[in-house]
Every structure is written in C-alpha cells, then in structure tokens.
Image (cartoon, rainbow, N blue to C red):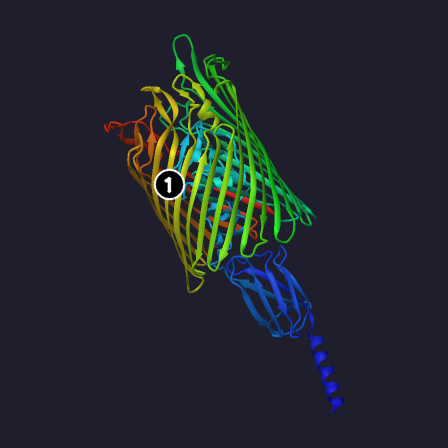
Amino acid sequence: MRLRAFFFTIFLLAASGAGAADLLVKVLDAEKKQALQAAQVKCILPAGQTIMGQTDSNGQFVLKNVVYPVQIRCTSVGYAAFSHSISFEQVNQSDGKHNYEILLEKNVQNMAEVVVTGQIVPVLAKQSIYKVNTISSEQITQRAAVNLGDALGFEMNQFISNDNILGSSTSMGGLGGQNVKILINGVPVLGRENGNIDLGQLNLNNVKRIEMIQGPMSVMYGSNALGGVINLITNSPQKKLNFGVRTYLESIGRYNFSGYASWMKKNHQFQLSLARNFFQGWTPEDSVDRYQQWKPKTQYTADLMYHYARNKFKFSYFGSYLHEKISNKGVPIVNPYEGYAFDEYYRTMRQIHSATIQIQLNEKEQLQFINSYTPYTRTKNRFKKDLVTLQQFETPSVGDQDTSRFNMFNLRGTLTSKRLKNTEILMGYEFSHETGKSYKLADITQQISDLGLFGSLNYRIGNWNFQPSLRYTLNSQFGNSWSPAFHSKWHISERTQFRASYARGFRAPSLKEMYLQFIDQNHTILGNPDLQPEIGDHAEMGLDYQHPLEGQKSLGFHFTSYYNHIRNLITLAVYNNHGILRQYQNIEQYSNWIQNLQVKFSTPRWSISTGASYTAVQAAGFVPEHQIFETVFQANYYWKWAATNVNFNYKYNDKQPVLSVDNQFFYTNPIHIANCSVQRSFFDRHLSVQAGMKNLFNIQNSALNGATTNSGSGHSNSTGMQVFPSRSIFFDLIYNFK
C-alpha cells in the first residue's frame, strides 16, 4: 500500500514537471490592439504560489515555471479587470515557447484620473473634495489645441476674448482674467498685460492635462486666485529613450513645428521640448496688403525638465523660456513728397525657473518645497518707415519706446501628515515678492510682497469628508487679512457624490493697477494707489451621478450651482467724464449666480458630452443687471472599420458684456464656434495624423450693440470685437520615435 502511494506521488510530480514552462503573457487594448504598458499581472499556481509583476513597454510579462491550470488576473488603469483560469490547451505554442494574449476592454465607468491642484495629497478626480474639471491630453489633441486659449474655448463658464497686441484672455465664472491664477506645475505665471495672462503664450506641446477649479482658491494659492485656478501639468519622462516631432499647419497662415526628447538612466530623468510657432497674420482680401487685421506673430519656446529620485528624496527642476514678437505694420501714408508708415514691434520674453524638493519623512509625513524665479520683459518699439528706401527711424513721442521688466520670487513649502486616523493635514507657507521697472510706473520702480501662512484639514467620517482651511496673509501694501474656506463631500454611493463649500477670496491690487501711468495718442490710463483689495465670498454645491449601462456604457449627470459676491471689484473706469482718460477704481459690490448642468454618455466607441450654463449678474455701479446663457456639445466617435476617430466640438456663447473706452456698457452678438476633425494612427501608433476644419461658421467679428449707460439711454456701435480669423483647414502630424 505504501509502495503504491509512493509511485502515485512520483507520477503526479512528473506530470506537473512536464507541464512546467515559462509563459509569455501579452496584454493589449481589445479595440485598438495597442500594447498596454504597466498592466498588473497576478498568477496563482495550482499549489497556491503567487507570481506578480507588470508588463513592459511592449505589453509583455514572463511567468516563470508555470504549471497548468493557472489562474491569471490582469488589471490596468482605465480598463475592466480580466480574470480567467487558463488550461494547457488554451496556450499558444510555437518554437517550444508558450504564449497567451490578454485583451482588456476599456472601462468607460472608470474615473481613475489623478488630480493634484489644491489637494493635500494627490487623489482620484471623483474622490477630490473640490470640483476639479480636467482637460486630458486626448481632449487637447482632439481640439487641435496649440495654446491654452484653444483648449479653454470649449469649456463651460470660460469666455475667451482676443486682442491683437495683448493676446487672448479668459473670464471664469463671470470674473475677469485678473482674478484667475494660472500655474504651470503649481508655479505662478508672471506677465499680466491689462490684468490678463496671454493664453496664446502658453504652449501645450509639453502638457499632459489641464486642471481647473472654479471659485476662490486663495487659501491654497493666495492673491489672484479669487475667481479660480488653472494648472497646466507637464509631461514627465517615461521611457529610457524617446523623442518625437510635431508639425501643425493651418490655412490662415499658421506654421508650427515642435519636437521633444526624453531620456532616463537609473535615478535620473531628462526631457527637453522645443517649439517654433509662426503666424503670418491675416486680413480680409479687400484690405490694404501691408496692414493686417490679425497681427503676424512668431514664438520660440523651450522647456527643460530634470528629475532625480533616490530612496525618500526627490528633486525636480523645471525651466521654461518664451520669446515672442508681434509685428504691427501701419497703413501706408503717401503724398507727393514721400511714402511712409508707422510700424510697431512688441517683444515678450519670459523665463520660469522652478526647483522642487520632496522628502518622505516617514510613511505618514512628507515635506515639499517649490521655489521659483520668473523674469518677464515686454518691449515696445515704434518706427517711422520710409517705404521707398526701406529705412526706419525710432519715433520720439511719449510711450513709443518702452521696456517693462518684472521679476517675481515665489517660495512655497508644505508639510502633509496622515498621522491621525481618517485625517489628512496640510500646513504651509508661501512668500511672493514682485518687482516692476518701467517708465509707465510711477517713480519708475515699484515692488510688492506677500507672505501667506495656511493650513487645511481633511477629515473623513463614514461617507462624509470635511475640509476646513484657513490662510493668514500679510501684504506689504495692505496689511493682514484672513481667508477661510470650508469644503465638504458626501460620498452617497459609488455612483453619486454631493459637494458643498464656502470660500473667501482675497486679491491685492497689482503694481500696474496702483502705479500705471500710460499715455499715448489714444489713451491716458492712470493707476490708483488708493485702491482697496478685492474681497470675495463664494458658495457652491453640486451633485455628480454616474449610471452604468450594459455593454461598457455609462451615463453621467453633473449639476453645480455657484454664487459669487465681491466687494471692491477693481475695474478701469472713466475719469472726470473725459473719454480717453481712465483710472482704475473699485466697484463697491458685484454679485452673480451660475447654474451648470452637464450630461456625459460613453460607450467603447462613442463619447458625447453636452451642457448648459445660466449666469445672472446683479446690477452694480455702472454694470446693469443682465443674464448670460451658453451651451456646449462635444462628440468623439471611433470608427472601428477605418481605425479612425471623428471629433466634433461646438459652443454657443450668448451676449457678453463689454465696457467701452468711454464707459458705455455694450453687449456682443451671440457667438457660435465649432471645430471638426478626423484622426488616425499608423505604424503601431507611432504616427498620428489629424485633419480638420476650425471656425466652421466663419465667425470673424461680433458687433457691439444694445448698450446701456449709467443714465439708461441706449447706444449702438458699428465697431465690434474680434473673435477669429476666417474659417480654416488644419493639418496636424505627430511622430513618436520609441
């Protein structure tokens, strides 16, 4: 009996040994057959042993000495989990090797996008206590967005306006660009002209996503964040050696070229991005050839990133450089004696140098320091050009030749702790010092400093999250102030989340708003050193509901209601009833209500999003009571037979308020904007080609009408606001060498 049992055991071991072999598992996207890197693979052998690992850049992972049958489980972010018991007969065998292919289906219900803006620690988007809107790299590509203005143009509560000299700007939730803080990797961007950062100067070639939070974020980010925050998150090196090029062509005269290279070796990561963006200018066919309605523009940008990580220490450097030239050539003036024109050239140079140090003190506590230095220079030169000899000479009038220089240091440090149960704590400081030097500033040189001490506590009890926050600000010009905030989130179920919050914002007047003395032939703009800081109160509540459907389909509803009330809103107002003489002043009270509703529907092939927004602005000072309505619609379809994506983006902007030079309150006509494109990848997704059309409705200008003055009389204006050049066809080609 014992002998029989012995031989039976030997037989089982021999059978198992015969079946033991290495198994190569390859993980692919089920629809596009694309290799999935960093997919998690878990294997459970018959004897109970567990083998774990992740796929390489080719989507492959080798399981050593596999004995069948084997239980394999595979997961990847954005895909439904795969779990299956594999027998020996199901394995492909060639040249004595065992191979098994796993096809993962996209999980459209997955919301596993990590966000960092305003967070104590990085979290998934649906877990954030803030309502964070994101624009992914896929959406940036689908919109053929070259700069930040292109990407934001189809977002709710974002209205993009254009100025040929000052560039494009945004208003968020009815508040102007001076109240929106723009960050790159958490570092403030310097260089406001007329209160706004030029969105056209923020190139997206190296950006992997854009995160936006509407409402005061003064606790986390200090001044200029009264209306909200827009944070551009750049790409990080992902492979040992990778580089690529991009060419963007548009029929209205845009010719852009960019390239990048990244490299990794042990603990070191490098990435360099370069771009040249050229716009030859555009004007209607019946206009003067020399003068162009949309000014020619040339940009050169460069981004450098370096990462070093070892044990519990991480160091990052991010450097960004911009050089832009705008040419404003005048209309020819010809008489019997000479032919000449007045030309203007505007040059902008901005650098960002940022160093980030992250130290993991222990499993529950972490220190982070972000220190940055940003110099910004804008130069204006005006010439009288002889159109016969082509010689040019500087003109001597006041304001014709000017160089403005601004420098900002920003030092920020935070300590995060999870030592207390169900509690995350953030404590930090932020110091900002800005210096401005220009003949347009009173006394030529001015400076302002700001020190903030802030803290935030996120406490979880059951399905509730509560996050009280507080910031103490000490400003060199305006003394101290307190900015409290309270955010809450009720995780009703896996499908439903409810958020409610209150926040107070603080914005100190800028150096230009206080000390500007700008005088030329058409304008006299004066700063006001007696300006008071803006104080804003913001309340919001919102409900997100995600309803799963059969066949990897999903239907989502998102409703949000906002209320803003701002005291001492700073605006440029007419001074002493003189049309061309204006001065920055405070509006005592400003309030608006915003209601947003969005619906999103997703299938493995379709992605559709639509929404509507209603804004009601209460009367304040020279601002009359008015309402604004807008709708958005975006659709993406994957045509499986042709392996092609079809994209369509549309937005309707109702009338927008515009303050004229003589303090009249006008409205623009409603504006329809739409883009469409087709996109396809070749050569195992190394080459991406996109072609399409922008400005489908050929909207070029929006007339100003329906004006209302302080006295209530009606006016009209034959002039208008520039919106876009003409309808255009674009071609976008991206090639990645891996």
- 576 is higher (above) or lower (below) than 497: above
Q: Position of residue 319 (x, y in %)?
A: 60, 36
Camera-side residue of 161 and 197: 197
In the figure, 350 relative to 139: above or below?
A: above
* 1 up-or-down from 384: above or below: below
Q: Position of residue 316 (x, y in %)?
A: 63, 42
Residue beneath disc 1:
564
Nearest the viewer among 201 and 119 is 119
Q: Callout 1: few (<14), some (14-19), or many (20+) C-alpha neighbours within 10 Å?
A: many
Report the number of discs.
Answer: 1
Locate the N terminus by quadrant.
bottom right
Q: Nearer the viewer, residue 272 or 353?
A: 353
Residue at image coords 49%, 48%: 138
374 left or right of 549? right
Quadrant of residue 583 within the rendered picture:
top left
Is residue 731 something that shows in the picture? yes
Residue 640 visible in rendering: no
What x and y, as percent, mark residue 259? 58, 39
- Give the residue drawn at x 44%, y 51%: 488
